Structure formats: structure tokens, C-alpha cells
Image (spheres, grey):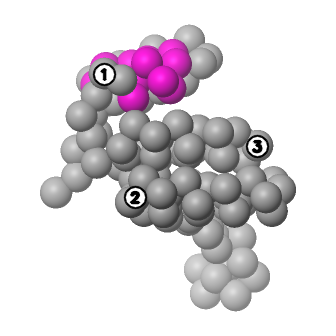
Amino acid sequence: ETAELVAVCDNDQDALNAAVEKTGVPGFSDLNTMLDNITADIIILTTPSGLHPAQAMACFDKGFHVVTEKPMATRLADGENMVKAADKAGKHLFVVKQNRLNATLQLLKR
């Protein structure tokens, strides 16, 4: 109730069109263009892991907080650089660690 989706971004035009149609928000095919043209508090990265570091740092440079899925990076140095960039920008980096395939949670679900 207190969150609002303000834009979506995807470099796959069909996926972008589907997201825009489903959500009714503006769509962008380029992350930097989106970051330059929206007002938001936080960016949620749901991209392949190898893209998280560069994308997160671009978000921090533009003044956004970031939520990303695990792994936050595929190399330790990249993960450390993400944390440093967040600290330097005074922004928060949140890493979501999904447990939906965890054996205990699957047992509970069954």
C-alpha cells in the first residue's frame, strides 16, 4: 500500500512491452536512460548476477538505493565494490536471499 512502481526496464523489447502493458508504467530499454528520467527511492535489479555490480553502481551514482537478488555478484571484488559504492553514495544495498527451494521450507510447504 505504501510502494509505487514508477517504471520498468528491459533490453528485450517483447518483455518490456509486456511489462508496460501489465503495469501501466513507463518502460525503458536502457538502465541509464531510466535512471535519468525517473523519480524513485529504490531500484530493484532482477537481472543476471553478472550484471548486478555495474548496474548497482550506476544506481548509486544517480542517488538510488538498490535491492538485488543473490548472488549479489559473481566475484568477491565486485561485491566489495558494490558495498563501497553504496557507502560512498550514502545509500543502502539490500541483497534478497530466496529460500523457496530450501529443503526445510519445501517440507513445510508440503
Q: Secondary structure at mark 3?
A: helix
Q: Earlier in the sequence, mark 3 or mark 2?
A: 3
On the image, numbered disc 2 is attached to which residue? 91
Kind of residue at disc 1: Asn
Contact check, label 1 and label 3, Cβ < 8 Å: no
Q: Quadrant of the C terminus?
A: bottom right
Q: Nearer the viewer, mark 2 or mark 1?
A: 2
Name, please, the residue furthest toward the left: 1
Residue 39, horizontal then vertical, whole percent: 24, 34
Name the residue type under label 3. Gly
Quadrant housing residue 72: bottom right
Q: Secondary structure at mark 1?
A: helix
**Residue farthest along the right direction in this orientation:** 75
78 or 69, which lies in front? 78
Q: Which mark is residue 37?
A: 1
Q: Is residue 13 visible?
A: yes
Badge 2 amino acid: Lys
